[in-house]
Image (cartoon, helix red, strand yellow):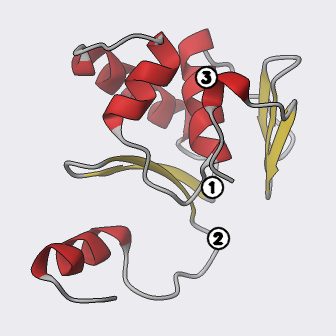
């Protein structure tokens, strides 16, 4: 489900045990709530709406800050803090895909085929996964 973040109509995103309620600005993994800042919440919404897909840094920057921002350090800090808050909320993990962006991955699903990193390397080399 690849949607424009600013016009995302879904009030609730549910992915397995992860529930994001946009109308109440709440995030739950199973029963416990996770306290997030506004920016962390918006980042998680965008990543969850595109779960399993790599979202580029540029796309996240422009969607969250709604400007052409070269402040990638700001994004890196927010992602790092979000990652810490998601730690221990298995099966979800927020991963960095080198020189590509970020991906929200469901670790409970068994991978079929090569990892994202391997697929990128294969594409670069001209091979098909």
Q: In this view, does 105 lie to the left or right of 126?
A: right
Task: Check if mark 1's residue and mark 3's residue have beta carbons within 8 Å.
Answer: no
Query: Which quarter of the rendering shows the C terminus?
Result: bottom left
Q: Label for residue 6?
A: none
Q: What element carries label 2?
A: loop
Report x, y in % for residue 62: 42, 21
Q: Name the residue under label 3.
A: 42
Q: Earlier in the sequence, mark 1 or mark 2?
A: 1
Mark 1 touching mark 2, by CB under 8 A? yes
Q: Which of marks 1 and 3 is in front?
A: 3
Disc 2: which residue: 108
Q: Residue 19, how many percent across, how many down?
A: 81, 41
Give the residue drawn at x 67%, y 44%.
49
- Of badges 3 and 2, the one in the foreground is 3
Q: Residue at 35% of width from left, 22% of height from top? A: 75
Nearer the camera: disc 1 or disc 2: 2
Which one is earlier in the sequence, the residue at label 3 or at label 2? 3
Q: Looking at the rendering, which quadrant does residue 38 occupy?
A: top right
Between the residue at mark 1 and the residue at mark 2, the CA separation in whole angstroms equals 8 Å
Q: Where is residue 55 in the image (x, y as percent from the top left)?
A: 43, 45
The residues bearing labels 3 and 2 have C-alpha atoms spaced at a distance of: 24 Å
Is the residue marked by circle 1 packed among few (<14), some (14-19), or many (20+) residues within 10 Å? some
């Amino acid at each position: 489900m690849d949607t424009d973040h600013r016009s995302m109509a879904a009030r609730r995103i549910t992915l397995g045990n992860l529930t994001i309620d946009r109308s109440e600005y709440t995030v739950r993994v199973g029963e416990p709530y996770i306290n997030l800042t506004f920016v962390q919440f918006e980042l998680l919404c965008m990543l969850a709406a595109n779960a399993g897909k790599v979202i580029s840094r540029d796309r996240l920057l422009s969607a969250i800050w709604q400007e052409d921002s070269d402040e990638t350090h700001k994004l890196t800090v927010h992602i790092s803090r979000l990652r810490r808050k998601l730690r221990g909320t298995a099966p979800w993990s927020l991963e960095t895909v080198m020189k590509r962006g970020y991906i929200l991955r469901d670790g409970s699903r068994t991978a079929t085929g090569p990892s994202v990193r391997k697929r990128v390397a294969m594409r670069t080399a001209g091979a098909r996964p």
